[in-house]
Amino acid sequence: MALTSGTKLGPYEIQSPLGAGGMGEVYRARDTRLERTVAIKILPSHLSENTEAKQRFDREARTISSLNHPNICTLYDVGHQDGVDYLVMEYLEGETLADRLRKGPLPIDQVLRYGIEICDGLDKAHRSGVVHRDLKPGNIMLTKTGAKLMDFGLAKASAASSSAASSSLTVTMSTPIGSHPLTAQGSVIGTFQYMAPEQVEGKEADARSDIFALGAVLYEMATGKRAFEGKTTASVMAAVLERDPAPIASIQPLTPLPFERLVKICLAKDPDERWQTAHDVKLQLKQIAEGGSQSSATAAIIPQPGRKRNILAWAAAAVLAGVAVAALAMGYLASQKELPVLRLAISPPPKSQFNLSGDDAGPAMISPDGRYVVFSANTGAVSQLYLRPLDAVAAQPLPGTEGAGYPFWSPDSRSIAFFTPDKLKRIEVGGAAPVTICDATLGRGGSWNQDGTIVAAIAYNAGISRVPASGGTPTAITKVDNVTYSSHRWPSFLPDGKHFLYLAINHTAPSSPDTGVFLASLDGKENRLLFHTLSNAIYASGHLLYMRENSLVAQPFDLDAAKFTGEPASLLENVQFDASVWRANLSASNGGLLVYASGTASGNVILTWFDRSGKTLGTVGDLGMFYELALSPDDKKLAVTDGISAAATIWIHDLSSKLKTRLLFSGGVQRTPVWSPDGRKIAFTSSQQANISIKEIDSATPPENVLSSPEAGGFGLEDWSPDGRYLLYSQGVGLDLHLWILPLFGDRKPFLYGDSALHQYHGEFSPDGRWVAYVSGDESGRPQVFVSPFPWNGAKWQVSNGESGEPHWRADGKEIYYYDFTGISAVEVDGTGSVFQVRNSAKLFPLPLRDLYHEYSPSRDGQRFVAITSSEGSSQSLTLVQNWPAQLKKK
């Protein structure tokens, strides 16, 4: 039976369906007594009279109720009403391991961490006399608090028979249910790809059968491939019974050797030769993790169960073997022989995540000589460039590159150029601090030729320029017309150093057929469309590499004639395309090495609520690439810009119903939302921030354009006056900003707010409209918060001490909050008189923000704060491919 929204089962009110399977229907529901979200599983009506199904449903309830553990989905309640049997379980937010694996293998540190948690839950079940019998990625949930085991519908007590049917479902998650591997019903219990040989043969299953399934899960987590595959049920069963899976090292060569040995023991055909308990496996995983998950040469060697080993001797042998392998590999790379096709995984630095997509990303770039990879990684909200030598096991941070993005190499592989929000800089490998090449505004890529010339997109909404790598004034080579194209980006030199490729796009029409790769010359004499595509292109090993639909393709390209000489051939699947900036996340060396990010480009920040002490109160929505947020005047809605797609879009979250809607469905980029005082309208910027518009949120009426600038990228909306008569906005380039006032009456002629000789930005009206709090860095040489009267009369009062930004008022005007670059501070103020008074100040709580624009907002009473924060979710993965052209020869 399908339950409709609002149906009551005891005290539980059904809200929406989560999924359905052969043995259960699962719904999201609200516990009206405790005001919490739960998951309810019911036995379908067509099975309610089935004795075996009913027994199995009851057995699942008894099984889960006996297992109270943080890594096992919790059972809250059981019930029966109007002929409906139901289980009430913990509602888990996250994704199943099966869903995560569709994006590719996990970094080894995550494999170890989740593996330890899975073992912990499994060990609890085994110690309670329960064998799971259907452990697989689809039955493991990855949540913010860790991995959780689900679906004990096939579980049995250690001495019970195993004659139940196999198909079951315990879904208590907030993500869509994915497809599952081959499953069959009958006397064989479980899912074939993860069943132990004794289960396939219909023999009694015990805890060691779960150990086999655990090994298959760990194998898949590390490699992204199932340990046992086949086109038919019979071929899968034969693989489980007769064959060993391909060595993990053949798929992920950088996997620690002790981990591979551990998995091999888990997958032993004879139960007596496996690890005997999940606790044993957990201890071994911990030992590998503590020994350094990125080093296969120095990690301890795991002894075989039941046999003594000289661990020191094995460890020494491993070190010598690792050194020998490294030496042979380097010698092989230096030779002229045909190299095999190899794929290696590159993990992020410990306790960090790759920062590969979005406006401020640092995609992995391999050096021309193939010796290094440079990339950006996040630790908390702080990003930095890291250098990974390919003959070493660890990456090292590059000092002075905090917040750096879009790095690219010098042709001799000795220097790295990169962008900051307002500069293009360079740093020597192993050298001193970075030096500035030229000014830039949110640059979009560059390339460096043998003559020391750099071509770069030094602004996100401009053409391609040339500049000496030693530094100087950029000279424009191409210009955007702001009609057909709004940006030229991702320039890439061809081998002659005189011609380059670049991508021309239109933000207003992201999928325009005009979007394509151009070929241009350094002297500006040649500039022609080469082919239509929505992604950048690079030249490597006689081919142009670019994205075509969902595949990375390689197409033969004649450099002399500057034209294609053959058809495109599919090279790789699952290469990440970052639609937010129109870029495939890959790079190639001169010698046939390729490094790319896999999976879809996903946001790595989330909207988080905090109280005044910094305690996390919850989150809003899902992960995204959020850039600005604004809380509505009544605290009931949240407007936020999400740049996950090619056109950044403003979304409105209803904080009570949890629903979100787009402000506009028209094309183009919308940014910097600001609420009207009555909460009925939102002002925003569009057309690359060249226009300011106003839209009624509950009306189909098109937005009204209230101000346009001939210079794109000029506007950043700041606030709307409490009386609804004025908009406050900033205008300028980089940090050369000034505050302006736009009247929404009369001739609507803007006028400057503040001192034209000073840089002022991040402004906000006081609740009574008499004052403006803003940031200026001219007085002390560092940004600080000030308050001045409105209208401006030259008077000012300093509110903050030390570097600070983004001030916000409490709704009663008695407190101002600001970001001091480590967290949120508050200062008591009094603006009721003719002289503004600043009183006590205090640090509220630490909060790492990116120091961009409108990244947090206080509630009216100042007791809660919503902010854009970094997620601790799974990191994107990097893959290094050796001799990728050999793949084309096989096709």
Image (cartoon, rainbow, N blue to C red):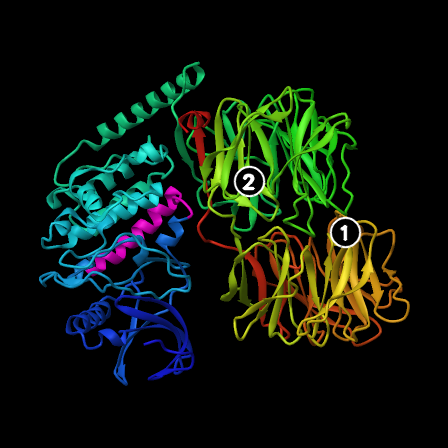
The magenta segment is 103-125
Q: Which SS does the magenta portion mostly show?
A: helix
Q: Earlier in the sequence, mark 1 or mark 2?
A: 2
Quarter in which the C terminus is drawn: top left
The amino acid type, in three-letter code, at marker 2 is Ala
Q: Determine whether the residue tagged by mark 2 lies in a helix, strand or loop.
A: strand
Task: Please tell me the numbered disc located at residue 777.
Answer: 1
Across and down, in percent, residue 712 comes to 78, 50
Relative horizontal placement of residue 385, taking residue 29 as reference (left or right): right
Closer to viewer: mark 1 or mark 2: 2
Is residue 102 or residue 39 the one in the foreground?
Answer: 102
Across and down, in percent, residue 838 comes to 74, 67
Task: Please tell me the numbered disc located at residue 807.
Answer: none
Does the residue at mark 1 contact the one at mark 2 (Cβ under 8 Å)? Answer: no
Q: Please, is residue 562 above or below residue 515 in the view? A: above
Q: Residue at x 39, y 75 (%)?
A: 29
Q: Please, is residue 439 above or below residue 84 in the view? A: above
Mark yes or no: residue 59 visible: yes
Residue identified by numbered label 2? 584
Relative horizontal placement of residue 212, taking residue 20 as reference (left or right): left
Single out the residue that lies furthest toward the right.
Answer: 747
Relative horizontal placement of residue 599, taking residue 634 as reference (left or right): left
Quarter in which the N terminus is drawn: bottom left
Across and down, in percent, residue 580 comes to 60, 49
Asked if residue 123 lies in the magenta stretch, the reply is: yes
The amino acid type, in three-letter code, at marker 1 is Gly
Q: Determine whether the residue tagged by mark 1 lies in a helix, strand or loop.
A: loop
Is residue 687 or residue 301 the one in the foreground?
Answer: 687
Q: Residue at x 69, y 47 (%)?
A: 506
Give the Cα distance between marks 1 and 2.
38 Å
**Neighbours of disc 1 within 10 Å: few (<14), some (14-19), many (20+):** some
Res 33 → quadrant: bottom left
